Amino acid sequence: MSFRKNKILICLVLSINLGFVSNADNELDKLIQKLDSVMLERGKFEANIENQLSNLKSLLNEQNSSIENKYFIINNIIDIYEYYSFGEALKYIELNLQYAKQLKNNYLIEECNLKLSKLLISSGRYKESVDLLSQINKNSLDPNLLSSYYSDYGGLYKRLSYYSPVSESRKNYLELYGKYRDSLVKILPKNSEEFLKLLEKQQRDNGLLKAALKTNNIRLSKVERDSKLFALIAFERSISYKQLGDVNQEKKYLILSAIADIKNAVKDNASMTELATILFKERDLDRAYKYISFSFEDAEKYNSPLRFVNISNILPVITKAYESSANVQESELKNLLTYISVLAAFLLGLVFFVYSQIKKLSLTRNNLKLANYELQNLNLKLSQSNDDLNNLYEELRKSDKVKVNSLGVFLNLYSDYINKLELYRKMVRKHLVTNKINDLINLTKSNEIINSEIKLFNKNFDEAFLHIYPDFVDKLNLLLTTESKVKYNPNSKELSTEIRIFALIRLGITSSSQISKILRYSVNTIYNYRVKVKNNAINRESFESNITNIV
């Protein structure tokens, strides 16, 4: 029993895990599809950036713009070019440095130098960056620029420690990085992005990966989805998942980072390269080659030697594997084409053989076709004759049925009247015998018996007529104008007086005096009904003759 419970528990756990894996795969598939879609729109996002730059440059070229205004306009241009084009960013930083020197503003000069050192560091020009930072006097530096100063130095020594092959040098660089990082932490607000970034990195370096992810959550909550900063934070989150060994989450945040980079036309990026590397290891060579090529094009546009070095480490490997796979596919395709060619030759011979047989059968088929055509005509004529006979038989059957039913109705009606006369005779005789003359006179004065008989007569007449001509009212209305059609409730099966008049006309009773006797109305009333309806007819002249032709 215990073994069975354990078995059930294991199956349940496995099914839950499989469900999570399936959901994760579905999410990644959707994100990759979105990334592929955004990649196709790269030109649109680049056009947006170019449009922003064009507007800023138009402001810069205005003749009445002061040097101070030009400086701040160029700062905006640098912010865009910093991730879009290394060469253009460098050009405008140097131009701003000239303006700062013209203004003799030490704050602006140092601000330009710090921006220049940051750009040099990001592009791998560490020697030039060291030379530039060493010229800055920290003691005389404005407090607002101290965070940039410590950040640049910290970033510089961190990268030098990463790329240095000498262990002693690496150790010294890491110590210097730690000093500048600690100095930066002291002056940064605890809730600032820069502080949280350093905190997350420190937690990650110390192996506190869950804490690093919590810090990253705080950073993500403060930025807009698909912004430049979101791309950077998502990339750093993927590093934590990489160290945890969670490949799916690593890929997820690399994809999100890459999407944000493309939407912001960020050319100095690493997400696509890392994603291509993972896909290469998973043997998804088509996508790996596609993504690394895309990343190479961005690096080429940005023109950063460091980014080219990073991509060059993986690009040849992926390209070689992709070409090898393509060669295998090409070889398989050639073999397949050979098989298809042989099969095509065989099929061609078979086609000629079949064609010769078809040609021999063609004459016989033509003769059979003519014979079949004559048989079809004969069958069609016989079929039409059978249909006519069936229709005639059906009409005769219906006519006989109607006649039988009508005869039965009127036989019952006459029988009822004979019985009623006999009852009436007996009642009169009884009153005479018992000398109830006055009661008999009072009975004969009442119209109740007559009225009930008239109602019964009308009911029987309506039912019998509608049984013979069930569509009479609809066909009568077809002869009248739209606004003057007679009203009839098919559920009650009771005809109005004016419908009964034309029902009698259909039965061949056309005299108003005869109709008045049957319906027990005055001749004048019958005439007025006939004239009223006839005046509303579409064709007054042929109206009553059309009534007699209703079937």
Image (spheres, rainbow, N blue to C red):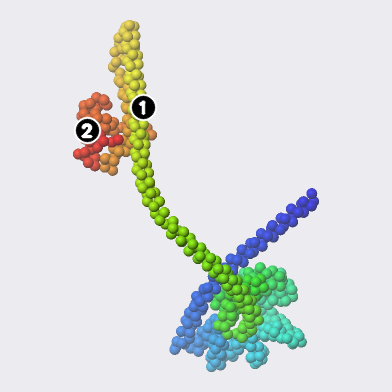
- Quadrant assignment, res 263: bottom right
Q: Residue at x 36, y 41 (%)?
A: 382
- x, y percent for residue 42: 53, 75
Is residue 235 visible in the rendered structure shown here? no
Q: Which residue is mark 1?
A: 405
- Quadrant assignment, res 365: bottom left
- x, y percent for residue 69: 50, 86
Q: Are discs 1 and 2 less than 8 Å apart at CB?
A: no
Q: Which of 353/468 is in front?
A: 353
**How far apart are labels 1 and 2 at the CA level?**
33 Å
- Left or right, 274 with reference to 455: right
Q: Is residue 349 above or below residue 52?
A: above
Q: Secondary structure at mark 2?
A: helix
Q: Residue at x 58, y 78 (%)?
A: 293
Q: Residue furthest right?
A: 2
Identify the amino acid type marked 2: Asn
Q: Residue at x 33, y 16 (%)?
A: 418
Q: Is residue 317 above or below residue 345?
A: below
Q: Is residue 376 above or below residue 391?
A: below
Q: Which residue is mark 2?
A: 528
- x, y percent for residue 524: 20, 29
Is residue 6 visible in the rendered structure shown here? yes
